[in-house]
Structures are given as structure tokens and as C-alpha cells.
Amino acid sequence: MRADLEIIQQWIKPGHHVLDLGCGDGTLLDFLQRERGASGYGLEINPAYITHCMSRGVSVIEQNLDTQGLANFDDNSFDVVLMTQALQAVRRPDKVLDEMLRLGNEGIVTFPNFAHWRLRWGLALSGRMPESEALPYKWYNTPNIRLCTFQDFEALCRQKSIRITSRKVVDGQHQNSWVARLWPNLLGEIAIYRITKENSQ
Amino acid sequence: MPDPLPADSVGLVTPQTYHFDTPLELACGKVLNRYELVVETYGELNAGASNAILICHALSGHHHAAGYHSADERKAGWWDSCIGPGKPIDTRRFFVVSLNNLGGCHGSTGPSSTNPDTGSLYGPDFPVVTVTDWVNSQARLADKLGIECWAAVVGGSLGGMQALQWSLTYPERIRHAAVIASTPRLSAQNIAFNEVARQAITSDPEFHAGRYSDNFTLPRRGLMLARMVGHITYLSDASMGEKFGRELRETAYKFGYDAEFQVESYLRYQGERFSESFDANTYLLMTKALDYFDPAYEFGGDLAKALQGARCEFLVLSFSTDWRFAPERSEELVKAMIAARRKVSYAEIDAPWGHDGFLIPTPRYTDVFTAYMDRVAREVGA
């Protein structure tokens, strides 16, 4: 299993009710259901992924975060709300974070770090928008419209009084490498943040 | 029947009649002492009876869901696009059961049948039946067929309501419910359309308060109008536009009231054909069953509370251009399922055909439906 998913699943307890925003082909939810005894739903807009989820028995709901929001879910109706590699693709990541912590006690977020040294280097040298394994698109066709750095994200959390309870930094292969931990904003490619409301335990 | 027969057709099928002698108490308080249901089945029931699928029909549907009754039959059963070898409901894996509901006019006991207690035609005296009554009668059919638990109950529109009601009335007898192009309750607009249809029928001078058979006549005009109104609501503006546009039957306007536009003559033709094959009292009864359906009613309007009792997994599908039961109605249902923590998968199929989209194969619809049913088959070992 991918190292980032491996890390996430350790934070899910048996019986946890989970919402996965942008659940893709349902790999994570399927794993959490089978191995961790979790229940829950995935939200997805890609038809091929939705079909894949249905085929493997993951409860998937076609819903567009940007246009439909999350109003169909009640406050505090989940233990954990997940969002892996989708924060950078929504129109208002700040509002999505608010919603995640409205629906769940805890949020888990992963996204690519735009301050990774290779991206900085690429932009500095070529003067063109950088591409990497974590961001394999051209500037004009990328679904990633809200790129940020680890520092940006953490600043937003501070501003919103969101508490970061854990942060694991992995590289493009989703390995939890020691170099990335050393200087995450420069050397880390993807971070896995565990967040909660400031006042919660 | 096309020659040669397509490989994905169930081929020639023969309906069967099942007799029931145990009195069935209906929601309206009346009792049917004896009744018959006409049923078609496709595929084979496996040794553990775990691979059975119940197909519930919509307003004007019946038991003939797939295949052909004879080599001369021009059109296949009403849901032939989804039932057959290699189709979403794969008859190589599933045992498929389809019936004509109580109150119907295609062989099951209904207004055009003889009341065995009196020896005369039921006509307008046939009791109003509800979706729950149908589900109860279907459970007895399942008993007769030796099916303790359906792998899935599947239906579109009014059929989807039956699938939903199954999950609530017999939670232990259904593993999956596929609720397609349906709604948890009719809107005022939906009921309004039904009322126009009923008024068209009951105000036809040939209706005779439902005793048209005793008067050797038929309320053809009324039934035709009812069907025309219904038909408009089943299609989308775009699909009608594509099919007919403003095309005229002749080259110039005639400034009269004959059917000049192609769409007018199409609707008249559809309405007339329907009025010859469908019973007016059945149409009244079926539209009433639609109007009354509201599983949240007993729970103070709280659909999530109603769904707490369900145990099965749900597939909910809607169609983007369906304005009869728009995607928002399905989303309302899904929202309640989420609040009740039921397992549910939902997709909105982008298709131009309006409400009728559930009968017409489009690639995404076929993919999603096939993927879900394939998973059901694997789960029950089919």
C-alpha cells in the first residue's frame, strides 16, 4: 500500500464513520472498510472512478464540491473527513476546510507542496511553470488551480484557528524519508496533515 | 422478433399466472380474498436461491420486461435494454422475476378482472392499492418461488418506489435496492399532472363512473389525453426538439386545428395506441398509488427516520434532463440515506432523454449499472 495511505489508515479506528472528499477509485475507503472496519462514503465527480467504486463495493456519491458544496451532510456526522490530493483542485480550499471540520471531529488532508526544491529550481532556471510527478500537468490543463506550500497551508490553519495535530512529510513516491522531515517546506513533496478544531480535544 | 435473435436477448418467453388464496389486507382497509399475478422469469434460480432479482414496473408497465412472446412480436419487453445475457441485469447470472402488479390490466387481478366473490367485473370497485400493498403481494410471490431474500429489487420511476418500499417493509428480505429515476415522494407539480390525467379520463362521457364495460364502451378520448400529458412529462424539451423540432406534416401552415406539427400527430398516435391497450380504471389507480407514496409520512415527514429501518445497500441513479423526477429528488433521497447512515451509491447520468432515460441505454448508464450489478452477483455467488 502507498506510504501516505498507510499513514492515514493508522489514524482510523474500527467503527469510525468516514467521509472521503475526492475519493478517486475508492482504494483508501475500500481498505479502511475491509481492514479497519470503518464505514462511510466517498465523494467523486470522475465517472470512471465512480464506476470503479461501485464495482468494488465502496459507497460513492457523485457530488461536485465546487458547485454543490457539502450542505447535504449534517454537522458532526463523521469521525474523520479525508481529502487526499484534492485540496489544490477545489475553488475555495479555505471554505472546504471549514466544511470538513463542521462535518467531522477530525480532518486529514494531503496536497503537493509547491515550495519543493525541484519546483523552485525548475521555475528559477527555465522561467516556466514547473511540472513534477506530483503535479504532472501543463499550466493550462491542470486541475490543480489552488497550489500552495506547506507554509501557506499552516498559515491558513493558524488564521482559521485550526489545530494541526500531526504532520507527516513524504516524497513523490510517498516514502516517508528523513530528508523531507529535515526541511519539509523545501524537501517535502507531499504532506499529510491531521487537523482538528482549536478547542476540541 | 428480429431474425437472427441478438445474442444478448433472453429470446422467447412465456408468462405464468400465480393464484393466491390467502386474503391480502390492503392499506385502504379492504381485503382481497383471492387474486392472481402474471409473472415472467428469465434465467435460472441457483441452488441457494441467492441470485434472484425482482423487477418492479413503472406506471404503465407490466410483467413483460424482456424478450419476445412470439416470433411475430415487433417490440421486445419494456426493459429489454437492461435485462439479458451480458446486459446490466445479466440473465446468465441472475434469476429475474418481473410481474404485473395488482390492479394492472395485463393479466393480474385488477379493475378489468372478475371479482370471484361476486362473479361480476370489479371495474371502479377494485380497491385503491398502494406501493406497500404491491410490495406485500410481491413478498407472497417470493414465498411461492422459494425466494427468501432478493439479491436486489430493481425499478425505475414508480418501480423505484417499490424497490425503496421493499427495503423498509422487508429489510431482511432484500440485499440491494436499485432506485432509478425515482423520488421519495411526489411534488405538488407531479400530483397536478396526475390530476389532469385523471380528470381527462373521468370527464370523458364514455367513462360512466368507471362502468364503461357494463355500457359496452371505453373512455378512449380521456385515456388518450391522459397519456398525451404523461408522455410530454416523460420526455425532455431537447429530446422532443431533436425528434420533431417544429417540423410540419405538410409544407405550409393551414391555420386550423388539425395535427399540423409532427409532434402533434406523434402524441395523438401514442395516445390512441395506448387507449386501445390500457384500462382506464387501472390508469386512475396507478396514478393514485404514485400520489400516495410517501414512506416518510408515518415518521412525521422525516425520511431519514423511515430509512433507519432499512438494512440493504442502495443504488440511486438519476438522469440530468429528467424533469418529472429531477435529480434533486434523488439527491433528497440520498441525503436522507446518508443521515440514516445507510450504504448508498449515487450517480447522475447525463442523458438527453428526460424521464424515459432509464429505459434507454447510454454508455455511462450501462457502465454504472453493470458495475453495480456485477458486484451484487459476486456478492451472492452468482
Image (cartoon, coloured by chain):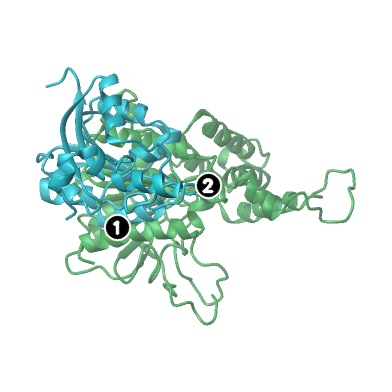
Spot the residue most to the front. Answer: A125
What shade does chain A have?
cyan
Q: Which residue does the image show at 61% across and 47% down from the upper left?
A: B231
Instruction: Specify few, some or many for label 1: CA neighbours under 10 Å numbering under 14, 14-19, or 20 or more.
Output: many
Separation of marks 2 and 1 at Cα, in angstroms:
25 Å
B83 up-or-down from A102: above or below = below
Q: Position of residue B68 (x, y in %)?
A: 48, 71
Res B20 visible: no
Q: Are marks 2 and 1 on the same chain?
A: no
Residue denoted by label 2: B355
Residue B95 lies in what quarter of the image? Answer: bottom left
Subunit that carries the residue with mark 1: A
> Viewed as shown, does residue B218 lie left or right of B296?
right
Which mark lies nearer to you, 2 or 1? Answer: 1
Chain appearing in green on the rendered image? B
B211 up-or-down from B7: above or below = above
Position of the N terminus of chain B, as image quadrant, is bottom right
Q: Which residue does the image show at 35% across and 43% down from the upper left?
A: A120
Spot the residue most to the bottom. Answer: B4
Subunit that carries the residue with mark 2: B
Residue denoted by label 1: A55
Res B235 visible: yes
